[in-house]
Amino acid sequence: MSKNFYAVIMAGGVGSRFWPVSTQQYPKQFHDMLGTGESLIQKTFNRINNLIPSKNILIATNKRYEDLVFHQLPKIKHQQMLLEPAMRNTAPCILYAALKIHQQNPDAVMLVAPSDHWIENEEMFLNNIKTSFEACAANDILMTLGIQPDYPNTGYGYIQFEKNNAPVKKVKNFTEKPDLETAKQFLASGEYLWNAGIFIWSVKSILKAFEVFLPNMVSILNKDSKVFNTDKEEQFINDYYASCDNISIDFGIMEHAKNVHVLPVNFGWNDLGTWGSLYNKLSKDKQENAIVGAQTIFRDSNGNMIRTQNGKKVIIQGLENFIIVEKDDVLLICPKQDEQDIKQIAAQAKEIFGEKVV
């Protein structure tokens, strides 16, 4: 492990498309979504900890999840927490992390990774991160990992790269979620990758980029660099963080900078953004039903996603391609093809049943 290796795990989202399991009080990253014995954030932390010292891993999350993080990640100390007093997307959070890390170690290279992604081949993932760290330590570049696409997905952003023989490619441009025909064209060209939202750079390079593209944000969060890693940091962030623009790192910097590069990777990635994506990663029975938690009997039922409290006895007859999810006193039954409606379903449930259900 290198003392210059750092990571920021982004763990502030709510995961509303995983309702009713994922709620504002207990979001999906703190759940064992796949029945592995570890929550998603625990799996992410332990994976990264194989390469990066635990004291160099920061957790960026909403203030309300502080106790959940400490409970699930006992190696984490208070000074490793980036507690966001307001939701402001990824750019302010990444700037906060970079300023904090730079104050500790100006030679640091940092990984920014979501807390809730699934990675099949962890050894390959760590090798890809090492390659990226080496490239960023040697060059003034901003890097992202691009997933080799295996079908024309319309739910992901795409990265177009310049073809060359080097492992790290220069990025031509980013494209937001395309329609199906465009996605098919992207795959046929062989020069597009899925955008996984995993970033690597030196703290010097990312701070330089912030100075160029988001100088107002720098002026807000770098009013007093001496507060970072002191007892005054939390109060400083509480006072000024909400003044930052609500903007993603993609829109704020990556789509404008000229020194953006990508490493094409293929380590078995899934962003676990919906029940359908979770279904795709789970093992299935002979009728292609995926089960987490439940004891089940299926009669003439195929392709269903079932998640209940551990040991719940569930009998299903004559149902195909449905999501059936139980959490406490809430039961959701929804066709898989309509899973994108779950966010709206949760909003309606909140309106009718009250805050506690979401």
Image: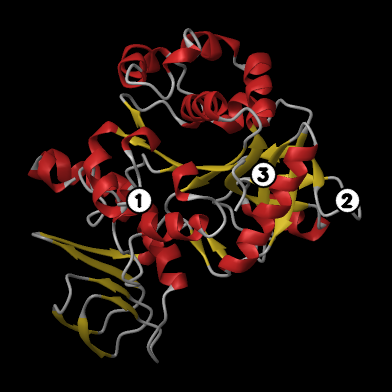
176 over 266 or under it: above or below: above
Image position of 3 (left or right of 58): right
63 over 197 or under it: above or below: above
- Measure how far apart labels 3 and 2 are at the Cα level: 16 Å
CA neighbours of label 2 inside 10 A, class few (<14), some (14 to 19), many (20+): some
Q: Give the residue displayed 37% in from the left and 88% down from the top.
A: 285
Pair 2/1: label in front: 1
Q: Earlier in the sequence, mark 1 or mark 3?
A: 1
The image position of residue 49, as x and y in percent, is: 49, 56
Q: Mark 2 points at which residue?
A: 163
Q: Earlier in the sequence, mark 3 or mark 2?
A: 3
Residue 152 appears in the picture as rendered: no
Q: Give the residue displayed 17% in from the left and 70% down from the top.
A: 309
Q: Give the residue displayed 32% in from the left and 12% down from the top.
A: 239
Q: Mark 3 points at which residue?
A: 144
Q: Mark 1 points at which residue?
A: 75
Q: What residue type is labelled 2?
A: Lys
Pair 1/3: label in front: 1
Tag 3, which secondary structure?
strand
Tag 2, which secondary structure?
loop
Question: Which of the pair 179/3 is nearer the observer?
Answer: 3
174 over 125 or under it: above or below: above
